[in-house]
Image: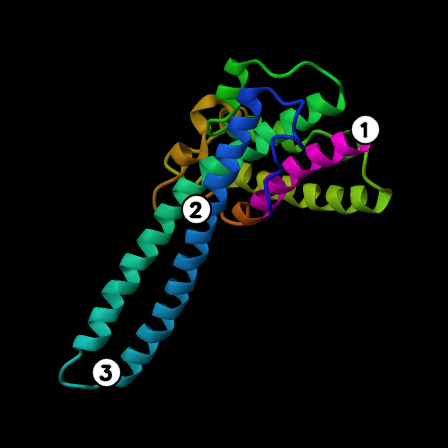
């Protein structure tokens, strides 16, 4: 999705525009790398499986062993890309919604300090609060069908956030977190990830990336319709 021009977002302060643009292009470029890494991982799984089949019972199994090592390295790389992508996506979501809300409400620009704070990885509580802002209050320039579709997607995201709360509260974890603890500053997901478990942002990255990219366009669309 194309990022709106400076003219299309003229009412934004310099800090608001620059932070949104930086997060947008960071997210977009890392997202492309994420897609490439997942494609490579899928290919290596297939190659590794084929090699294991061919090497079954063979005297020398160098091929399957080598491909298995490469597959493991590719898996670690994909995980690393996701860990870089999550702060960009989640911060872009929270900042974008905050700016859209203040533009729709006709409020003054966010201060440079607030922009800088919102441009960092949010806590789970901050992300939950941003996603809980009523869609109908944000997309007042959109038609009813668009609002309904956006609301449905938002509810799906909120359900996935609930899943993160549940994962962090799992009594099988060494240090399970209550909902209040999970919402606190210590629970930025890059730091709250329990060892040996699937990434907490699994299932959130892609739909959040779509929402974040759309939010900047929603700001531009609102301003165009208002003007």
Secondary structure of residue under mark 2? helix
| Residue at (65, 30) in percent of width and height | 7
Secondary structure of residue under mark 3? helix
* Dot 3 crowding, Cα within 10 Å, few <14, some 14–19, many 20+: some
Q: Quadrant of residue 134?
A: top right
Q: Of 66 and 56, which appears nearest the observer?
A: 66
Foreground: disc 2 or disc 3? 2
What label sits on residue 55 in the rendered view? 3
Earlier residue among tags 2 and 3? 2
Judged left or right of residue 52, residue 8 is: right
What label sits on residue 29 in the rendered view? none
Vertical relation: 182 (above or below) 143:
above
User: Where's residue 203, x and y in %?
Assistant: 54, 49
The residue under label 2 is: 30
Structural distance between the alpha carbons of marks 2 and 3: 36 Å
Q: Residue furthest left?
A: 59
User: Where's residue 221, x and y in %?
Assistant: 74, 36
For residue 170, say whether it is visible.
no
Earlier residue among tags 1 and 2? 2
Structural distance between the alpha carbons of marks 1 and 2: 33 Å
Judged left or right of residue 63, residue 41 is: right
User: Where's residue 111, x and y in %?
Assistant: 57, 13
Earlier residue among tags 3 and 1? 3
For residue 111, say whether it is visible.
yes
Circle 3/circle 1 CB separation < 8 Å? no
Structural distance between the alpha carbons of marks 3 and 1: 66 Å
């Amino acid at each position: 999705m194309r990022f709106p021009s400076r003219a299309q977002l003229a009412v934004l302060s310099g800090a608001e525009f620059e932070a949104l643009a930086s997060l947008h292009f960071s997210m977009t470029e890392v997202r492309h790398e994420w897609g490439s890494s997942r494609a490579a991982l899928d290919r290596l799984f297939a190659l590794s499986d084929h090699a294991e089949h061919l090497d079954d019972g063979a005297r020398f199994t160098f091929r399957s062993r080598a491909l298995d090592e490469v597959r493991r390295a590719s898996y670690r790389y994909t995980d690393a890309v996701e860990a870089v992508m999550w702060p960009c996506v989640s911060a872009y979501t929270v900042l974008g919604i905050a700016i859209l809300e203040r533009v729709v409400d006709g409020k003054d620009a966010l201060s440079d300090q607030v922009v800088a704070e919102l441009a960092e990885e949010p806590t789970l509580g901050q992300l939950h609060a941003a996603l809980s802002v009523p869609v109908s209050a944000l997309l007042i320039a959109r038609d009813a069908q668009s609002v309904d579709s956006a609301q449905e997607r938002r509810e799906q995201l909120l359900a996935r956030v609930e899943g993160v709360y549940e994962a962090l509260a799992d009594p099988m974890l060494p240090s399970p977190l209550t909902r209040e603890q999970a919402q606190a500053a210590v629970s930025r997901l890059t730091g709250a990830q329990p060892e040996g478990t699937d990434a907490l942002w699994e299932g959130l990255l892609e739909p959040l990336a779509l929402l974040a990219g759309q939010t900047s366009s929603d700001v531009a669309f609102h301003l165009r319709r208002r003007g």
